[in-house]
Image (cartoon, rainbow, N blue to C red):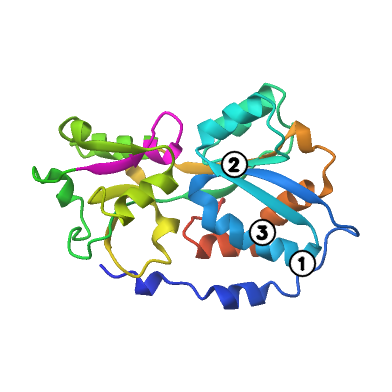
Amino acid sequence: MKHTALRVCFGLVLAAFACVPATSSHADEATIAVAANFTSTARKLGAVFEASTGHHVVFSFGATGQLYTQIAHGAPFDAFLAADQERPELAVSEGHAVSGTRFTYAIGLLVLWSADPQLIDGTPAVLSDPTLRHVAIANPATAPYGAAAVETMKALSVFEDLKPRLVEGKNVSQTYQFVATGNAPVGFVAASQILENDTGSSWAVPANMYAPLRQDAVLLTYGRDNEAAKDFLEFLRGTEAAKLIERLGYRPPGEN
């Protein structure tokens, strides 16, 4: 199934933000820990934010669980954009984040994807094919998208059959690479990852097959006085950022 219909004209999107007013009178830099599924979207948001404020943001991408472990051990991150709600909430309760700053910035969508345009017919039928060599998923212990993939396979009653054939990426970005390079014929990835890819085939996993991938952001204790971090989170909460996030493959935070 071609993804041409899903392609986004990012130049026009960026142009729409050209007149966004600056939110701070001086420039600062923030280092932000970001869930791997949000890599492309964060970079586009960062470009818009930097152009409109003069601030500079540095992103560190990884699996949500791995990033939280780094935060808990004192990594110098100013803010945290997770792929779940659990870790930001835990960060607040354990004193690593500022109370009252946590909010949902996106709801992720899971897809089964193949680089082969003919392999997936818009259904999960390929998962029942006994000749299917491998299925790539993100590590379910640290990556929420990996946990959602396991939930989906269990809902389809194929998990036990596929378990010996699972190939785990350390995060959903690596999982995407496994499939893109042909090391795995299919894999569960974020919908946002295939929007810019006009080849391949996919099946959009129904939302009722996995727990909602509510992705929360929070200001970390390390960055409590960092104006760039606070301004970026304020920008992320705004209507214009929400529109861009939705265009890039996520459901709006207000949806169930």
User: In the image, 53: left or right of 13?
Assistant: right
Mark 2 lies on residue: 216
User: Which residue lies most toward the right here?
Assistant: 25
Q: Which of marks 1 and 3 is nearer the N terminus?
A: 3
Q: Which of 123/182 is in front?
A: 182
Above or below, 158 relative to 248: above
Amino acid beneath label 1: Ser
User: In the image, 143: left or right of 203?
Assistant: right
Camera-side mark, 1 or 2: 1
Residues marked 2 and 3 touching at CB (< 8 Å): no
Above or below, 102 relative to 51: above
At a point 83% along the width and 60% down the height, the residue shown is: 23
Amino acid beneath label 2: Asp
Image location of residue 177, percent across then percent down: 37, 51
Above or below, 111 relative to 94: below
At a point 52% along the width and 61% down the height, the residue shown is: 246
Mark 1 lies on residue: 52
Camera-side mark, 2 or 3: 3
Q: Residues within 10 Å of mark 3 (few under 14, many from 20)?
A: many
Amino acid beneath label 3: Gly
Image location of residue 214, percent across then percent down: 51, 43
Image location of residue 17, percent across then percent down: 69, 71
Q: Which mark is residue 46?
A: 3
At a point 42% along the width and 64% down the height, the residue shown is: 195
Q: Which of marks 1 and 2 is nearer the N terminus?
A: 1
